[in-house]
Image: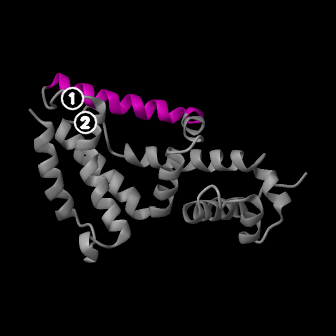
Amino acid sequence: MRIRDADKEKLVIEMAIDQIVRDGFQGFSMNKLAKACSISVGTLYIYYKDKDDLIQKIGAITALKYFTSTVKNFSPEMSFEEGLWKQWENRAAFTMKYPKEVAFFEIIKHSPHSEIILDSIKEFADFRKTMTEFMENGLRNKELVPMTFEAFWSVAYGPLYTLLNLHTEGKSMGGKPFKLTKEIMKEAFSRTIKGLIP
């Protein structure tokens, strides 16, 4: 029996994310991945049963990394404004540090693999519970206007993700160079919070 090699496994994950972000699921194959990693296709099957298993396992690793970073130094007991700002800071920091993983996560989220991946992560239930508690506390403390979850999500996070997309592309509307700064983020946040508090 062949032994797992942590460095090789790390390379496989990195190259798989790279290929899926670049070529999508249609352009991705185990053969192409093995070639990019300079390993035999057989070596991939030490780590993964098949292509779907590989996508789901890498998706779970990426999602867990994202959820863990999102709740860093965050508590559902925080005031609504303080907690939402912490969410913005954490989400922005992760996106800026790991743009490829975020692009990969977005592809996964809109694929048939999404539910399987999220169901496989025990911590996802904890993350969801934490975020629900945070919203409920905001409502109970009258720090948040009651609204449907979808409306809340688009108002609370839509501006942040628009700015992060512009940052990732490196340009604003009309091709003007753009880099997200804390000042711009705070400017957008101050308008966002006004739309959410009573």
In the picture, residue 196 is in which quadrant?
A: top left
Numbered label attached to residue 100: none
Residue 161 vertical position relative to residue 96 in the rendered view, above or below: above
Q: Earlier in the sequence, mark 1 or mark 2?
A: 1
Query: For this rendering, which residue is in front, 189 or 1?
Result: 189
**Residue that mark 1 sits on:** 147
The residue lying at 80 percent from left, 67 percent from top is 39
Segment colored magenta: 119-141
The residue lying at 62 percent from left, 50 percent from top is 58
Residue 97: x %, y % from top left: 42, 63
Residue 138 vertical position relative to residue 194 in the rendered view, above or below: above
Q: Marks 1 and 2, Cα distance to the nearest angstrom?
A: 6 Å
Q: In the drawing, does residue 97 fall left or right of residue 156?
A: right
Name the dominant secondary structure of the magenta segment: helix
Numbered label attached to residue 152: 2
Mark 2 residue crowding within 10 angstroms, few (<14) / some (14–19) / many (20+): some
Q: Secondary structure at mark 2?
A: helix
**Amino acid type, residue under disc 1 in the picture:** Met
Disc 1 vs disc 2: Cβ atoms closer than 8 Å?
Answer: yes
In the picture, residue 174 is in which quadrant?
A: bottom left
Mark 1 residue crowding within 10 angstroms, few (<14) / some (14–19) / many (20+): few
Residue 137 vertical position relative to residue 58 in the rendered view, above or below: above
Q: In the drawing, does residue 198 fall left or right of residue 157?
A: left
Residue 86: x %, y % from top left: 27, 47
The colour scheme is: one colour
Residue 96: x %, y % from top left: 38, 63
**Amino acid type, residue under disc 2 in the picture:** Phe
Total labels: the figure holds: 2
